Amino acid sequence: MILPLLSIKHQSDIVFSPDILSPPLAKGVKISVIHDAFFWENPDHYNPLWLKVYLTFLKWGLRNNAQVITISEYSKIQIQKNLKIPTLPVHVVYPSSTIAAIETRPNLNRPFNHPYFLHVGVMEIRKNLLVLIEAFARLVEEEGLMDHKLVLVGQRGPRKTLDDYDNILLLIKQLQLEGKVILPGYVDQQELEKYYRHALAYVFPSLNEGFGMPILESFSYGLPVIIANQPTLKEVGGNAVWVASDNTSEGIAMAMCGIAKDDALRENLKERGLERLQQFSSNKFFLSLKNCFRRILNE
C-alpha cells in the first residue's frame, strides 16, 4: 500500500522488490526478485492456505508493467514454466558471493587426524544427505578407504516437514557408521573455517537448489567440489567441479573415490575453483544489475 504512493510521489522509473512480492500498482516498471521455483516444486513444504494466498498476491503483482530478476538460467526456466505468464520478461543476474580466496592460516588445527569429506548446511530432505551417507558407506566398504570420514556440519531443518535429521541418525546406525559420519551441529565461523580448510573435498548432493553458494565458499578455501548432476549446481560450478555420473549413491561414491585417490585431480580442481570464483565478485554483480536495469528502461 505504501510503495505505490511513494512511486507516484517520487515519479520512479523502477520499483525494485528484492523480496519477491511487487505491489499491484506502481509508477514505473515493477521488478521482483524470485530466486527459485521452490513454491511450485515443493508445495508440501508450505501451509496450503498460506501458499495459495501468497502465490495469488505474487501473480497479482506481476500482471501489469512487471518483470522478474532471478539468479540462474535454470531458475529462469522453472519460474517461466510455473508462473505461466508468457509475456512476463525474466532476467538472470548472478548474485554476488562476497566471497574471495582466503589466505591460509597456519594456526588452524585439523579437526581430525584422518582425511574427510565435508558438507555444510541444514539437514533438509532436499539436500539428499541420505544418499551421501550411503555413498560414503560404499566408499568405505568397496574402495577400502577405511580411514576416511564424512563430516556433516549443520543443524536440523527449520520445519518438521523439511527436516531429515532423525532419518540421518537412523541410517548412520543401520550402516554401522558411528564414529565415521560426524555431526558437529551448528559451529561458529572460526570452527567452520577449520572444517573447510582441512577437508579432502566438499560434496554437494542436493537435488533442488536455486543457486548453490557452498560451491563458491568451498572454492574460496581451495577445496575440490563434487556436485550432484543438477542444472543449477552445474551452472554455478562450471568446469571447476566434478559432476557425479548420476545422483545415486553409486554415482556419488565413484566421484568421491576419484577425488580421494588422485592428488593431481584435486590440485587441478582447486586451481579451477579459484578462477571460477572470480566470476561472482561484487563488482560483477553490481555491473550486471545496473546493465539489467538499463535494458529494462530502454525497452
Image: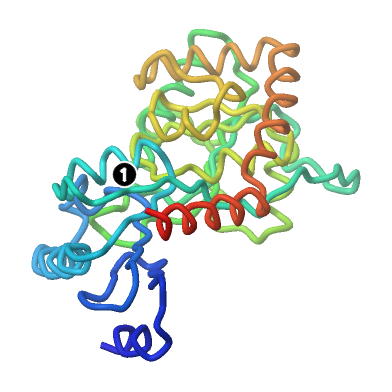
Q: Is residue 112 left or right of residue 257?
A: right
Quadrant location of residue 297? bottom left
Q: Nearer the viewer, residue 5 or 75?
A: 5
Q: Is residue 34 left or right of residue 271?
A: left
Residue 81 in percent (x, y) is at 19, 41
Q: How many marks?
A: 1
The colouring scheme, among rainbow, by chain, secondary structure or one colour, is: rainbow
Q: Is residue 224 left or right of residue 79?
A: right
Q: Is residue 130 left or right of residue 271?
A: left
Q: Secondary structure at mark 1?
A: helix
Residue at image point 72% right, 31% down: 275
Residue at image point 70% right, 54% down: 191
Q: Nearer the viewer, residue 185 or 45?
A: 45
Residue 288 in percent (x, y) is at 55, 50
Residue at image point 48% right, 42% down: 212
Residue at image point 57% right, 13% down: 257
**Residue type indicated by callout 1:** Ile
Q: 106 above or below 188?
A: above
Residue 18 in percent (x, y) is at 41, 66
Count neighbours of disc 1 (C-alpha within 10 A) and say few if under 14, some if 14 to 19, many if 20 or more: some
Of all residues shown, which one is farthest toward the right?
106
Q: Nearer the viewer, residue 256 or 165?
A: 256
Q: 156 above or below 256?
A: below
Q: State the quadrant of the N terminus.
A: bottom left
Question: Circle 1 is placed at which residue position?
Answer: 125
Residue 233 in percent (x, y) is at 46, 33
Q: 94 above or below 234?
A: below
Q: 149 above or below 97?
A: above
